[in-house]
Image: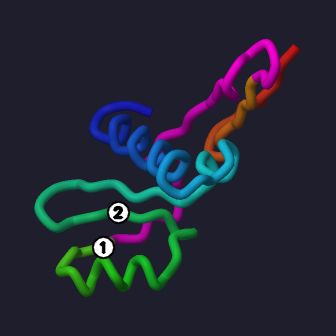
Amino acid sequence: MGANMQPQGHVQTLVRLLDHGQSLQAACDAPRWRFDAGMHINVESAMDPAAVQGLRDLGHQTRTIDDPYQDFGAGQFIWRLGDPGAEGYVAASDPRRDGLAVGF
């Protein structure tokens, strides 16, 4: 993930984790959007059609992208669950790229 998608992907993942209480893997898997310029927004093809229509109703011009590999970044995540000695960590791997979440 790089360029202008990097901060957008970070914010989208954190909002899903902190505001919506999603698991790390669910937040990682969730469809993403990308602001381009002005009122132009690209969305992944897995985005809820009602959400896309809501963006259009607000005046955004949306374009659906069927190839998330190139346009929406990817990440590998590690999240500490409170006290690492007692609760440990959880990891997630983005389906948009090759990867594996593993611990020892």
The relative height of residue 48 versus residue 10 in the rendered view (above or below) is below
Q: Secondary structure at mark 2?
A: strand
Image side of residue 76 versus residue 32, left or right: right
To which residue does mark 2 refer?
Answer: 42
Image side of residue 12 versus residue 60, left or right: right
Viewer-proximal residue, 75 or 10? 10
Q: Where residue 48 sits in the image (x, y, percent)?
A: 52, 76
Q: Amino acid at mark 1?
A: Thr
Magenta stretch bounds: 63-88
Label 1 crowding class (10 Å Cα cut-off): few <14, some 14-19, many 20+?
A: some
Viewer-proximal residue, 36 or 25? 25
Q: Secondary structure at mark 1?
A: strand
Give the numbered dot on residue 62: 1
Image side of residue 33 versus residue 99, left or right: left
Find out whether residue 48 is within the magenta segment: no
**Upstream in the sequence, badge 2 or badge 1?**
2
